[in-house]
Image (spheres, grey):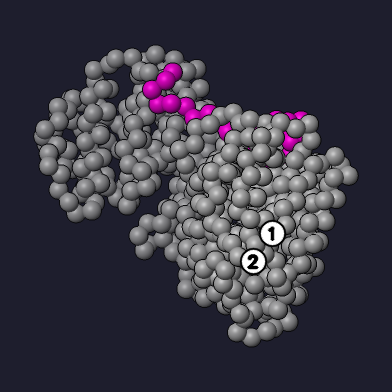
C-alpha cells in the first residue's frame, strides 16, 4: 500500500502551508498554495445552489435537526456548466505556476512515476481542516487524473490522541452489519435496505432497525457480539462549518454523534471498522466519528438523489464483497460508475467520500471474514526505546533551542518574553541546522538576537545539495552527519528511527509548538553517538 498525503494548513490570509509526504519513500516536500481564488469559490457556490434545487435530490436537513430546506425553485437538473466551471477553476488554481507551489506539483508527478512501476495500490489523502478545502472535488484535479488514475482520494480524519493498537474482533463467525433506517419521508430507503439484505445470501448477518428509538439504537450498538459495519440511510445533515452532523433517527428524534457516542465507542471497541452514511451532507458526521476513533467512514458530501444513493451502495458492495477489492478501490470504482447520472445530476460523481484515520490499512472483505481488523501503526513513545546517552553539549543545545523557539513564536506575535537569550548558558562553536522550511520567516529575526547575546555560539542554516528542503531532508542530513540538529514539522518516522539504529545513532525529538500561527509542529532533533 502506497500512501501519498497532502497536509494543508491555513497561513493567515496568504494561503496554505503544504507538506507532501509519501509513505515508504524517503520523501517530504514543503510548499505553499495560494488562497482559494474568488472565482473558484463563487463557481462552487453556484453549482451547490443549483444542485440542491434538483427535485430528485434528497432534501438537505438544515439549519437544525428536524428542519428541511425547501428549494426556491424546482428544476429537473442543474446546469452542467456549473460543474464544468468548478473543475476548470479548480485546475487553474492547482496548476498555477506559483514558484512556492511548483515543488509540490513536480514531486507529485515524480512520486507517481516511481509508484506506478509497482503493483501497489495507491491512495491519496487530503489532510485539511478548512471546510472549504474538504468540500472541493480533489479527484477532478487533472494532475491526479493523469498521474494517479487508479488512486482514490480520501479525507484524513482529524488527528487525535488515540494510541490503541489492537481492537477486539466481533464475537461472530459471520460478518455482521447493523442497518438503521431513519426518517425517510420523500425518499426511498427500501432499495438501500434490499442491497444490504441481499448480502445475507453470502453468509452475512444483517440486523435492521426501522426508525428506531434512541434506546433501540443504543442497545443494538452495545450488543456483546459486536458489528463489523454500520449503515445508516435516511435524512441527515451537517453544520455549515462541517464540525457537527446529525441523523434523523425517526419522525421525532434527531441525534448528533455526541448524543450516542458512548454506544458507538462500545461498538468500535468490539470491532466496528466501517460506517456508511448513505444520506445527506455527511462531512460533519465524519468529523465527529473520527473524534471517537472510528477507523473508516464513507459519507456523501452533499444531499444525494435516490437513484445515485442506491446505485452507489450496490456498486460498492459488488466490488467490496464479490470482487474482494479494498475499500479505496471499491469506492473509486463505484463512484466512477455513477457517470451515467452526469446529465441529470451534474457533480453527483463527486459525492461519495472516504474519511480515514491515519495509519489504518483500508478494509478488505476477506480481511473481515478472516476476523482480522486492521491495526493502527503503534505510535512510538518519545522516551521509550530511543533514549540518548548523556552528552553535555547536545543536552545544552536542546535546552537552548527550546528557549529559542519559545522566544521566536512570541516574537512573531509581537510579544516579548520575560527572559532574554542571555539567561541561557550557550555552548561555544558553530552549529549547523536545517530541515523544515516553515521556520524560515522566524529564523531571520531570532538567529540575529541569539548572536547578539552569545557571540561565541553561531547558528548556521545549511541547505541541502540537489534536494528539496524540508523536514525529511533535514533528518536525512542529520543522520548523514551534515547537521548538528534538524527542524521538523512532523514527528520522527519509524523508518528514520530504524535508519538511525543501523548507523549506531539515536534520535531525540522535542515537540515545541502544535498548530502555531506560522508553524505546524516543530520538533528539535539531536544526534547522539550510540
| Residue 507: % across, % down | 39, 24
Q: Which residue is mark 2?
A: 251
Question: Could you tell me which residue is drawn at 32 percent across and 41 percent down?
Answer: 513
Residue 462 shown in magenta: no
How many angstroms separate mark 2 from mark 1 (CA)? 8 Å
Q: Which mark is residue 522?
A: none
- Crowdedness of circle 2 by 10 Å Cα count: few (<14), some, many (20+)? some
> In the rendered image, which residue does mark 1 sit on?
211
Q: Quadrant of the N terminus?
A: top right
Q: Give left or right: position of 38 versus 124.
A: left
Tell me the element at label 2.
loop
Residue 299 in sight from this viewpoint: no
Q: Is residue 194 visible?
A: yes
Give the magenta part as a residue range. 361-385
Percent x, y of residue 483:
35, 29
Task: Identify whether 358 is placed above or below 194.
Answer: above
Quick one: quadrant of the C terminus? top left
Reply above or below: 146 against 183: above
What residue is rendered at 63% in x and 35% in y? 270
- Disc 2, disc 1: CB below 8 Å? yes
Where residue 148 appears, as percent x and y from the top left, is: 67, 50
Residue extending furthest bottom? 73
Quadrant housing residue 460? top left
Amino acid at each position: 500500500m502506497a500512501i501519498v498525503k497532502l497536509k494543508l494548513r491555513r497561513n493567515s490570509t496568504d494561503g496554505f502551508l503544504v507538506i507532501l509526504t509519501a509513505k515508504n519513500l524517503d520523501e517530504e516536500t514543503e510548499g505553499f498554495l495560494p488562497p482559494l481564488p474568488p472565482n473558484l469559490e463563487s463557481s462552487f457556490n453556484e453549482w451547490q445552489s443549483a444542485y440542491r434545487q434538483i427535485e430528485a435530490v434528497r432534501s438537505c436537513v438544515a439549519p437544525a435537526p428536524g428542519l428541511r430546506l425547501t428549494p426556491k425553485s424546482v428544476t429537473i437538473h442543474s446546469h452542467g456548466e456549473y460543474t464544468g466551471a468548478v473543475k476548470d477553476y479548480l485546475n487553474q488554481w492547482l496548476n498555477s505556476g506559483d514558484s512556492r507551489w511548483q515543488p509540490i506539483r513536480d514531486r507529485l508527478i515524480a512520486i507517481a512515476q516511481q509508484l506506478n512501476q509497482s503493483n501497489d495500490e495507491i491512495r491519496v489523502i487530503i489532510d485539511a481542516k478548512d471546510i472549504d478545502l474538504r468540500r472541493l472535488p480533489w479527484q477532478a484535479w487533472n494532475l491526479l487524473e493523469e498521474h494517479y488514475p487508479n488512486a482514490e482520494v480520501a479525507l484524513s480524519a482529524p488527528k487525535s490522541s488515540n494510541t490503541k493498537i489492537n481492537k477486539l474482533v466481533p464475537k461472530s463467525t459471520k460478518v455482521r452489519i447493523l442497518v438503521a433506517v431513519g426518517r425517510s419521508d420523500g425518499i426511498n430507503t427500501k432499495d438501500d435496505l434490499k442491497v444490504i439484505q441481499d448480502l445475507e445470501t453470502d453468509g452475512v448477518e444483517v440486523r435492521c432497525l426501522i426508525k428506531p428509538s434512541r434506546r433501540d439504537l443504543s442497545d443494538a450498538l452495545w450488543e456483546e457480539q459486536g458489528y463489523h459495519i454500520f449503515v445508516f440511510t435516511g435524512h441527515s445533515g451537517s453544520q455549515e462549518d462541517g464540525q457537527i452532523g446529525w441523523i434523523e433517527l425517526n419522525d421525532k428524534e434527531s441525534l448528533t454523534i455526541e448524543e450516542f457516542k458512548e454506544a458507538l465507542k462500545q461498538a468500535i471497541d468490539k470491532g466496528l471498522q466501517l460506517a456508511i452514511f448513505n444520506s445527506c451532507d455527511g462531512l460533519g458526521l465524519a468529523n465527529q466519528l473520527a473524534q471517537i476513533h472510528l477507523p473508516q467512514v464513507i459519507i456523501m458530501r452533499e444531499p444525494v438523489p435516490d437513484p445515485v444513493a442506491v446505485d452507489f451502495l450496490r456498486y460498492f458492495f459488488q466490488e467490496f464483497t464479490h470482487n474482494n477489492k479494498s475499500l479505496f478501490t471499491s469506492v473509486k470504482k463505484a463512484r466512477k460508475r455513477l457517470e451515467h447520472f452526469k446529465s441529470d445530476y451534474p457533480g453527483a460523481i463527486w459525492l461519495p467520500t472516504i474519511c480515514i484515520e491515519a495509519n489504518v490499512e483500508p478494509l478488505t472483505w476477506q480481511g473481515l471474514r478472516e476476523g482480522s481488523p486492521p491495526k493502527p501503526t503503534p505510535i512510538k513513545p518519545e522516551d521509550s526505546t530511543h533514549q540518548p546517552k548523556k552528552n553535555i553539549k547536545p543536552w545544552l543545545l536542546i535546552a537552548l533551542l527550546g528557549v529559542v523557539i519559545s522566544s521566536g513564536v512570541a516574537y512573531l506575535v509581537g510579544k516579548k518574553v520575560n527572559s532574554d537569550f542571555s539567561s541561557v548558558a550557550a555552548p561555544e562553536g558553530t552549529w549547523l541546522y536545517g530541515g523544515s522550511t516553515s521556520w524560515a520567516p522566524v529564523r531571520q529575526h531570532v538567529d540575529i538576537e541569539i548572536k547578539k547575546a552569545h557571540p561565541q555560539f553561531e547558528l548556521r542554516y545549511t541547505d541541502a545539495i540537489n534536494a528539496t528542503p524540508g523536514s525529511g531532508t533535514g533528518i536525512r542530513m542529520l543522520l548523514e552527519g551534515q547537521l548538528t540538529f534538524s527542524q521538523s514539522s512532523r514527528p520522527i518516522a519509524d523508518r528514520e528511527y530504524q535508519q538511525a539504529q543501523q548507523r549506531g545513532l539515536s534520535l531525540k525529538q522535542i515537540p515545541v509548538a502544535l498548530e502555531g500561527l506560522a508553524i505546524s509542529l516543530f520538533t528539535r532533533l539531536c544526534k547522539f553517538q550510540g
